[in-house]
Image (spheres, grey):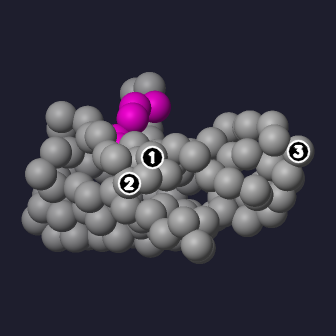
């Protein structure tokens, strides 16, 4: 079994910054792609950013230039640095990881979510 634990959410004023972390633990041989998603009340969950094991990144247009995704493969951890936050960034943020276990099977895991609230 694998657990993803997020941290770093909170309340911040518009224009401020937050850094989210997501640490994976458990039966992990390798983690391939990792990602951050978010879900605002009444909305569907949307992709925010992705990062491959090799460090290639992609971002939603709404966060390009403001958010940066990174990872530490040795720590099985993914980060999301969020700058110039806007009220519309308010959501529950979830991390996602494609995990390969010790028998070579791949599974998709989600964290429990962390609330980010941006006051205008």
Residue 83, percent across and down?
A: 18, 64
The kind of secondary structure element at disc 3 is: loop
Mark 3 in CB contact with mark 1 (< 8 angstroms): no
Q: Residues within 10 Å of mark 3 (few under 14, many from 20)?
A: few
Residue 55, percent across and down?
A: 38, 54
The kind of secondary structure element at disc 1 is: loop
- Position of the C terminus, as image quadrant, is bottom left
Task: Identify the mark nearer the N-term, 3 or 2.
Answer: 2
Mark 1 in CB contact with mark 2 (< 8 angstroms): yes
Residue 28, percent across and down?
A: 76, 58
What label sits on residue 52 in the rendered view?
1
> Which stretch appears magenta?
45-49
What label sits on residue 55 in the rendered view?
2
Alpha carbon of mark 3 to alpha carbon of mark 2: how far? 25 Å
What label sits on residue 103 in the rendered view?
3
The kind of secondary structure element at disc 2 is: loop
Above or below: residue 22 compared with residue 109? below
Alpha carbon of mark 1 to alpha carbon of mark 2: how far? 5 Å
């Amino acid at each position: 079994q694998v657990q993803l634990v997020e941290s770093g959410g909170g309340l911040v004023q518009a224009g401020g910054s937050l850094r989210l972390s997501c640490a994976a633990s458990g039966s992990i041989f390798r983690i391939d792609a990792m990602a951050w998603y978010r879900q605002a009340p009444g909305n569907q969950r949307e992709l925010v950013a992705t990062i491959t094991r090799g460090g290639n990144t992609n971002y939603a247009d709404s966060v390009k230039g403001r958010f940066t995704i990174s990872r530490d493969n040795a720590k099985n951890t993914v980060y999301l640095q969020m700058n110039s936050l806007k009220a519309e960034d308010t959501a529950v943020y979830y991390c996602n990881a494609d995990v390969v276990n010790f028998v070579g099977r791949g599974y998709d895991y989600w964290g429990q979510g962390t609330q980010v609230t941006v006051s205008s």
